[in-house]
Image: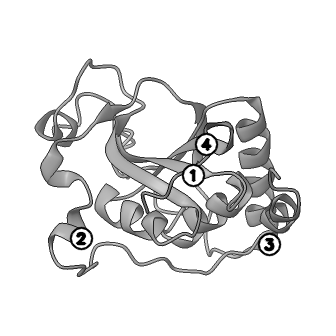
Amino acid sequence: MGQSVEASHVRHAIFSAGCFWGVEAAFRKVDGVVASEVGYTGGHALNPTYSDVCSHTTGHAEAVRITYDATRVSYGELLDVFWSCHDPTWRDPEGDQSQYRSEIFTLDADQDRIARQSLAEVRAAGIFKGSIETLIAPAGPFYRAEESHQQFYEKQGGHEVCHLGVAEVHTRVAAYSARYRMK
């Protein structure tokens, strides 16, 4: 983490896959991820706080914004990490767009296309028992969470307990995009 990256190789991605502490920890282990921050996105309130988001009145998801070196890891490979670090079949029984929902927030048309291909492949493969409930939507404003939430597990001595994936996912989309990473 924190490696110097040529500016033309820097890309961003935003994912929501449950408690943002565990999601961030999973992505921080990926070679090519150079920075991460947790925050809130996908809602309607301006500048929400953790308390606001937990009230289930803002519509925001706990999310992680990843900064990555596109010569070392592709967006498709990051999607495999996303699928592997949570249970995308979980559905909030209240339907309130829970802060813990599974959602991919796309930053451009390429990300949207790749995310939809990856979702279709994961669904077709039957990797998960049950219907995949993951949403895909264009990213809106991302509000950085309070400092106490940033790199939470590293601050706690590395004891990751709130996030365990239910499957290890390796898609053809990721394999293809790995071969054609930015050079």
Residue 31: x, y in percent?
57, 69
Instruction: Report the front residue among 93 and 122.
Output: 122
According to the picture, the residue beneath numbered tag 1 turns out to be: 68
Residue 145: x, y in percent?
23, 41
Residue 118: x, y in percent?
76, 56
Residue shown at the point (43%, 63%) measured from the top left: 1
Which amino acid, mark 2?
Glu
Q: Nearer the viewer, mark 2 or mark 3?
A: 2
Residue shown at the point (83%, 53%) measured from the top left: 183
Gap between marks 1 and 4 measured at Cα: 6 Å
Q: Nearer the viewer, mark 4 or mark 3?
A: 4
According to the picture, the residue beneath numbered tag 4 turns out to be: 10
When asked about the image quadrant of residue 158, the answer is bottom left
Q: In the rendered view, tell whether residue 19 sits above or below residue 143.
A: below
According to the picture, the residue beneath numbered tag 3 turns out to be: 125
Is there CB contact under 8 Å for labels 2 and 4? no
Instruction: Report the front residue among 45 and 91.
Output: 45
Which amino acid, mark 4?
Val
Q: Nearer the viewer, mark 3 or mark 1?
A: 1
According to the picture, the residue beneath numbered tag 2 turns out to be: 154
The crowding category of the residue bearing disc 1, from other C-alpha atoms within 10 Å (few below 14, some 14 to 19, many at least 20), is many
Residue shown at the point (29%, 36%) measured from the top left: 144
